[in-house]
Image: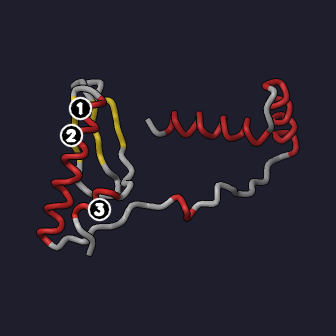
Amino acid sequence: MKTLNEYMAMSYRMEIVEDREEGGFLVSYPDLPGCITCGETIETAIANAQDAKREWFEAALEEGVAIHEPDSLHEYSGQFKLRIPRSLHRSLTEHAKREGISMNQYCVYLLSRNDAVLSK
């Protein structure tokens, strides 16, 4: 088992969501179940999240709860193969040319934009 400082030094993914009803921001760590906090500004929410993470680790270490290490991006190559209809391939190529970028860049843009919409 690692020490508190070793766990605090690890890069756990933080999710920040604006609370439009109550105001402020909610912050959670998906890899640390139940580790949630908030703040009136993003800055205070992030500072509170660091405190909440420390408290979460301290309690988990004290209680002997298993602490999972953060997900690693090393597991992902950043590449995948996708078969699409020729007509879609043509359309994507034409749009990319109009934008002055590669089709790969254009597809990354489209996927990122759609992922951001779906993540809300």
Please state the total of marks drawn on the protein image: 3
Q: Amino acid at mark 2?
A: Asn
Q: Residue at x 26, y 75 (%)?
A: 1
Label 2 crowd (10 A; few <14 / some 14-19 / many >=20): some
- The Cα–Cα distance between marks 2 and 3, rounded to whole angstroms, is 17 Å
Q: In the image, is residue 77 above or below residue 46?
A: below
> Which callout, 2 or 3, points at the residue further toward the start of the chain?
3
Q: Residue at x 26, y 26 (%)?
A: 41
Q: Disc 2 marks which residue?
A: 48
Q: Amino acid at mark 3?
A: Tyr
- The image position of residue 79, as x and y in percent, is 69, 56
Q: Disc 3 marks which residue?
A: 7
Mark 1 near mark 2, Cβ–Cβ under 8 Å? yes
Q: Residue at x 46, y 39 (%)?
A: 119
- The Cα–Cα distance between marks 1 and 2, rounded to whole angstroms, is 6 Å
Q: Residue at x 73, y 35 (%)?
A: 106
Q: In the image, is residue 29 above or below residue 20?
A: below
State the SS at label 2. Answer: helix
Q: Amino acid at mark 1?
A: Thr
**In this rendering, position of residue 15 left or right of residue 33:** right
> Which callout, 1 or 3, points at the residue further toward the start of the chain?
3
